[in-house]
């Protein structure tokens, strides 16, 4: 049987939060069997552990990032950490954080993935559990559509559509998501926004730490950044990155093919909540 994993040693990262604009530090720490992924706000008087699960997800606040909360403690924008844990097969992890939002770093998951590499992986004694399905499913939430099919691997097909002259439609497929393919094809894709959104975001206390160093800013005729794109289809790859992170709110890895049209954090969470009701939780056999 396949066993659960955690990180082998502690690794820390520090930087500005995308939405809060505050400097924060995270420390990835080993965890025991069946612990799951847990965030701990070490800056609070009572260090509450918030399990990164759909039960603690706050979909009403998942506008520009996924949010978890418990007993008055909250952590924003967890999706890049969650995506790395998912792709690396880390079942159990403690993430200590001294603010309400992890650092955005360069706007991608590249540096977080490197931190996971630096931390290494340790096998635990408990059997790994995975979600699988036996029949096709389809879910619709507003403009977002999620179709899921039985598959022996974790695969994603993602497409995005915008009413914008520069970015209208992109699609991307990855047929075997694991540590290696994630690092090469997905982790470096940076977050993005449209230039006309920035003022409204900041009026709502969002994007306060955003800059062209950690986000791609799209205008009517192209991108404002001087740095070239990392991929021709970087925008849909970043949406795929976010989806991989949000899917891990299921609490276990998923073995299935997922086709997502117009995914977004709020609807990703809605999808996960419905999926876990219908999926089978099995012991991983290899």
Image (cartoon, helix red, strand yellow):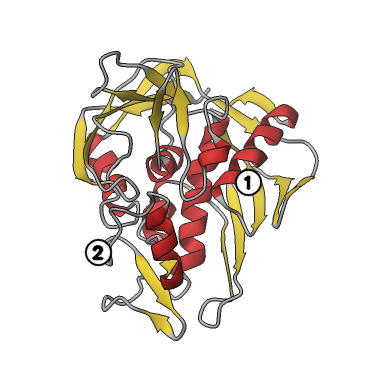
- Label 2 packing within 10 angstroms: few (<14), some (14-19), many (20+): few
Q: Are marks 1 and 2 in contact (CB under 8 Å)?
A: no
**Residue at 19%, 36% in the rendered image:** 12
**Residue at 34%, 63% in the rendered image:** 215
- Label 1 packing within 10 angstroms: few (<14), some (14-19), many (20+): many
Percent position of residue 147, x then y: 73, 50
Tally of numbered tags: 2
Q: Report whether 251 appears left or right of 274.
A: left
State which quarter of the image contains the C terminus.
top right
**Residue at 32%, 51% in the rendered image:** 18
Which is more N-terminal, label 2 or label 1?
2
Percent position of residue 60, x then y: 57, 39
Asked if residue 285 shows in the view, the reply is: no
Seen from the viewer's position, the closer of residues 151 and 272 is 272
Q: Is residue 210 above or below residue 66?
A: below
Helix, strand or loop under label 1:
helix
Of the numbered discs in the image, which one, if any, rests on residue 213?
2
**Residue at 48%, 62% in the rendered image:** 237
Q: Is residue 25 above or below residue 209?
A: above
Percent position of residue 70, x then y: 46, 21
Q: Report whether 153 appears left or right of 197.
A: right
Seen from the viewer's position, the closer of residues 139 and 84 is 139
Asked if residue 98 shows in the view, the reply is: yes
Q: Where is residue 152, by image quadrant?
A: top right
Percent position of residue 104, x then y: 30, 50
Quick one: which residue is furthest to the bottom in this view?
A: 221
Q: Where is residue 118, by image quadrant?
A: top left
Of the numbered discs in the image, which one, if any, rests on residue 267?
1
Mark 1 and mark 2: Cα distance apart in space: 28 Å
Q: Where is residue 89, by image quadrant?
A: top left
């Amino acid at each position: 049987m396949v066993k659960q994993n955690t990180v082998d040693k502690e690794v820390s990262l520090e930087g500005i939060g995308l939405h809060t604009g505050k400097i924060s530090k995270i420390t990835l720490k080993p965890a025991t069997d069946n612990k799951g992924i847990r965030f701990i706000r070490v800056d609070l008087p009572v260090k509450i552990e918030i399990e990164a699960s759909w039960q603690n997800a706050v979909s009403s606040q998942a506008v520009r990032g996924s949010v978890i909360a418990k007993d008055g403690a909250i952590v924003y924008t967890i999706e890049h950490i969650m995506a790395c844990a998912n792709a690396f097969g880390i079942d159990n992890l403690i993430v200590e954080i001294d603010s309400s939002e992890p650092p955005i770093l360069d706007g991608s998951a590249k540096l977080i993935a490197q931190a996971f590499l630096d931390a290494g992986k340790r096998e635990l004694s408990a059997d790994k559990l995975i979600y699988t399905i036996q029949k096709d499913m389809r879910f619709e939430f507003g403009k977002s559509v999620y179709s899921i099919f039985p598959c022996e691997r974790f695969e994603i097909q993602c497409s995005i559509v915008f009413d914008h002259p520069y970015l209208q439609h992109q699609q991307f497929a990855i047929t075997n998501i694991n540590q290696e393919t994630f690092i090469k094809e997905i982790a470096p894709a940076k977050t993005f926004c449209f230039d006309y959104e920035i003022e409204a975001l900041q009026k709502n206390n969002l994007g306060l730490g955003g800059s062209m160093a950690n986000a791609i800013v799209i205008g009517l005729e192209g991108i404002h950044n001087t740095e070239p794109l990392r991929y021709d289809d970087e925008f849909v790859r970043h949406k795929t990155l976010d989806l991989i992170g949000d899917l891990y709110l299921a609490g276990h890895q998923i073995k299935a093919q997922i086709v997502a049209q117009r995914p977004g954090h709020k609807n990703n969470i809605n999808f996960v909540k419905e999926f876990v009701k219908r999926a089978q939780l099995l012991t991983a056999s290899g």
